Image: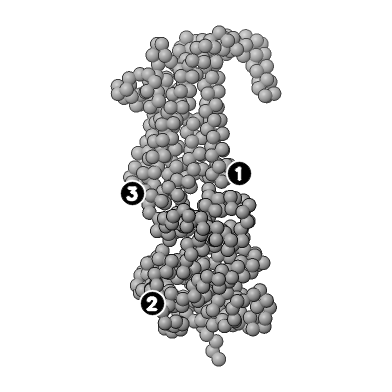
């Protein structure tokens, strides 16, 4: 907190001393003014972006776990499909944005779809790792008592994957907010309904730099809020799960 | 090759001319004959990598022999205790012990009865049953692992160096507890260890495995009366027999020449 105050003071003093024009570098006081003037618009945009991020994140949790469960059932399926999952992580959203607009139009559903695409991979990777990297002795224990595939999944693989899923969800939650904002950049805005992504875009185009700063700060706070909430829920889950230290495993590439 | 002595009319466990090779050039076991009589306590000792664990895994049905027969004539209920406790960290002590019954589909009333009986056998107080494995000491975890094996009321108990990671005092204490359980239940036991003193203390027979596949399995009979108590370890005859097993181990499983 002290550091923040020092940074703000130096920033304010520099703007005043060097007489930077406000469209290049607004002073903290200008940004605070923009937040005050534009508060309602910022709040509505933040809620809208937050909703898109949360929806996309939830969808990636559900889809990611289901895909990981399918992957865990067969090495063949895993080896043939995993490269396509990596595609999710490497595809530039800007390249498929026109396709998304063609199929789903602009607006909220398309933003959620972009969020899903961006935040899905960490869930698939970490959960698959947790479902698959199981001690051979534990698998033998289950075989000794003639456990079927369903029992192994339900009583061994899924609970074993919980800490891995928590790790993946943390990474994914941070990416979900980025995904929602990037999505709004390309596929998300209409003239009446828009989120932080569009606000960033339009304020920068109009050189309203103080408002741009306000939107960027709101984006960062939104990201921190979602990441913090997911981390908190994860820590709670892990303490119930029996990992009192709340440590999460290192996620290796699933074989 | 010499086969081990047949000790009963109908053995509980038997390997007949069993060979195991994980790849064609390196056999782990070669035409092994081994029998364990009903209610007998047999220990396998031998150098690292001689295939002791492989014998247990064959008996447990977790591994199929490359050739030969694994005979379990009485279709016994088998339980296996691993070197590591292998408890599920997300389950409490009680839930860990209950696991085999869940997998086997035993109904809940019967499960409750067996779980509490099993907890009693290993001397767990009611304060500990809701703890998670990470809250337990190494010795406590091993006791839970033992209780999880006993909860199925097995006819045959297979133990793969279960106490290797524990300190001597704790190992001796658990040896005594294991003997008490063995005599109370009449369970057939096949035990693998590196520790000669442990082998002699527990067993009716100690089977010394050869270093290389294809060598002779030889055995030392341990005829100290049961029930055995901790004081047995202080007797001269105990030390003498332990010395005999150690000497044979050093000779790679060969019997003394005299």
Q: Residue furthest left?
A: A102
Q: Are marks 3 and 2 on the same chain?
A: no
Q: Which residue is mark 2?
A: B16
Q: Give SS at disc 2.
A: strand
- Name the element at disc 1: loop
**Residue A176: % across, % down:** 46, 29
Disc 2: host chain? B
Q: Nearer the viewer, residue A34 or B37?
A: B37
- Residue A85 - label: none
Mark earlier in primary sequence (3, 1): 3
Q: Between A250 and A230, which is closer to the camera in this rendering?
A: A230
Dot 3: element: helix
In space, the residues marked 2 and 1 are separated at their CA atoms by 50 Å
**Residue furthest front in the image:** B109
Label 1 Cα crowd, 10 Å radius (few <14 / some 14-19 / many 20+): few
Residue B120 location (% of width, % of height): 58, 61
**Picture residue at 66% right of the left edge, 74% below the top:** B230
Q: Is residue B246 left or right of residue A205?
A: right
Residue, disc 1: A245
Identify which residue is drawn at 54% across, 89% down.
B257
- Cα distance between the residues tagged 3 and 1: 36 Å
Q: CA distance from mark 3 to mark 2?
A: 37 Å
Residue at point 47%, 80% (across, down): B217
């Amino acid at each position: 907190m002290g550091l923040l105050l020092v940074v703000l003071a130096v920033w304010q003093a520099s703007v005043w001393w060097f007489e930077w024009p406000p469209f290049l570098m607004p002073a903290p006081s200008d940004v605070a003014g923009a937040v005050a003037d534009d508060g309602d618009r910022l709040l509505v945009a933040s809620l809208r972006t937050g909703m898109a991020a949360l929806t996309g994140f939830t969808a990636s949790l559900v889809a990611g776990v289901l895909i990981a469960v399918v992957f865990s059932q067969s090495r063949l399926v895993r080896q043939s499909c995993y490269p396509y999952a990596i595609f999710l992580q490497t595809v530039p959203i800007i390249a498929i944005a026109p396709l998304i607009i063609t199929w789903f139009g602009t607006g909220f559903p398309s933003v959620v779809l972009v969020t899903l695409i961006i935040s899905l991979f960490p869930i698939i990777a970490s959960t698959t790792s947790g479902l698959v990297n199981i001690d051979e002795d534990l698998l033998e224990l289950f075989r000794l008592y003639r456990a079927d595939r369903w029992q192994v999944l339900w009583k061994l693989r899924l609970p074993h994957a919980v800490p891995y899923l928590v790790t993946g969800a943390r990474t994914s939650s941070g990416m979900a907010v980025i995904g929602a904002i990037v999505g709004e950049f390309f596929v998300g805005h209409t003239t009446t309904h828009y989120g932080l992504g569009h606000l960033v875009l339009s304020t920068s185009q109009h050189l309203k730099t103080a408002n741009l700063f306000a939107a960027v700060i709101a984006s960062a706070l939104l990201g921190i809020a979602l990441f913090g909430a997911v981390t908190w829920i994860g820590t709670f889950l892990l303490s119930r799960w029996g990992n009192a230290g709340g440590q999460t495993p290192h996620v290796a590439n699933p074989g | 090759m010499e086969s081990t002595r047949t000790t009963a009319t109908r053995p509980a466990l038997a390997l007949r001319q069993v060979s195991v090779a994980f790849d064609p050039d390196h056999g782990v076991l070669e035409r092994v004959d081994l029998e364990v009589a009903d209610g007998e306590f047999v220990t396998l000792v031998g150098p690292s990598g001689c295939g002791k664990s492989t014998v247990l895994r064959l008996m447990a049905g977790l591994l199929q022999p490359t050739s030969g027969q694994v005979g379990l004539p009485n279709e016994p209920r088998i339980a296996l205790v691993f070197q590591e406790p292998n408890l599920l960290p997300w389950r409490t002590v009680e839930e860990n012990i209950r696991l085999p019954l869940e997998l086997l589909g035993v109904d809940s009333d019967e499960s409750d009865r067996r779980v509490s009986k099993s907890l009693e056998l290993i001397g767990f107080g009611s304060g500990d049953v809701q703890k998670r494995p990470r809250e337990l000491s190494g010795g406590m975890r091993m006791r839970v692992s033992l209780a999880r094996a006993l909860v199925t009321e097995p006819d045959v108990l297979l133990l793969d160096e279960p106490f290797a990671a524990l300190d001597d005092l704790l190992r001796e204490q658990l040896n005594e507890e294991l003997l008490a359980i063995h005599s109370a239940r009449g369970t057939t036991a096949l035990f693998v260890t590196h520790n000669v003193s442990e082998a002699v203390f527990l067993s009716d027979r100690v089977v010394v495995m050869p270093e290389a596949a294809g060598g002779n399995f030889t055995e030392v009979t341990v005829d100290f009366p049961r029930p055995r108590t901790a004081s047995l370890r202080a007797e001269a005859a105990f030390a003498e027999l332990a010395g005999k097993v150690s000497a044979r181990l050093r000779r790679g499983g060969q019997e003394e020449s005299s």
